[in-house]
Amino acid sequence: MDAEPADLAIHCHCQSHEGLLRAPKVGMLTPAIRFVATKGKAQGGTIRLLCHVKPGVSASRAGIAAVSDEAVEVCVAAQAREGEANKAVREVIAEVN
């Protein structure tokens, strides 16, 4: 019997000009992408992404530009104001297959 995939929540800790979401301090050794399992008997967990966001790029450059050990570089056309860039980052991440 195949196990069903666990439901996952995605949290993106972004370092952007908006200052709404912040990455951990630079001196910490945290991988850019990591899975945090749910405590207890419950299945599932959270995928945490450490993102470096470049807001205000041309629409043709929008998307995931690079993935390294340090960060996922995300370019979005939205401007860094009133949560617009953060919303665009969530949309880019949601489109990843």
Image: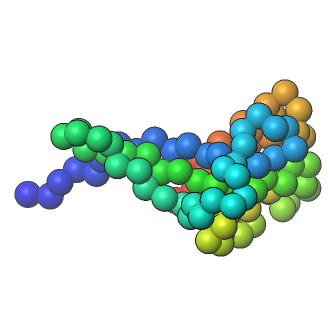
Measuring from the top left, give residue 21's x and y in whole percent: 72, 39
- Outermost residue toward the left in this view: 1
- Outermost residue toward the top in this view: 82
x 29%, y 41%: residue: 39
- Outermost residue toward the front in this view: 27
- Foreground residue among 32 and 4: 32
- Foreground residue among 57 and 11: 11
Measuring from the top left, give residue 59's x and y in whole percent: 86, 54
Q: How many marks?
A: 0
Image vertical order of residue 73 relative to residue 83, above or below: below
x 41%, y 50%: residue: 36
The answer to whether residue 95 is visible is no
x 69%, y 61%: residue: 27
x 25%, y 44%: residue: 43
Left or right placement of residue 7 versus residue 53 in this view:
left
- Foreground residue among 11 and 1: 11
The answer to which quarter of the image holds residue 54 is bottom right
The answer to which quarter of the image holds residue 31 is bottom right
Left or right placement of residue 91 versus residue 78 in this view:
left
Image vertical order of residue 61 relative to residue 19, above or below: below
Measuring from the top left, give residue 68's x and y in whole percent: 65, 72
The answer to whether residue 25 is visible is yes
Quadrant of the frame with the N terminus: bottom left
The answer to which quarter of the image holds residue 87 is top right
What coloring was used for the rendering?
rainbow
Left or right placement of residue 85 versus residue 67 in this view:
right
Measuring from the top left, give residue 4's x and y in whole percent: 22, 50
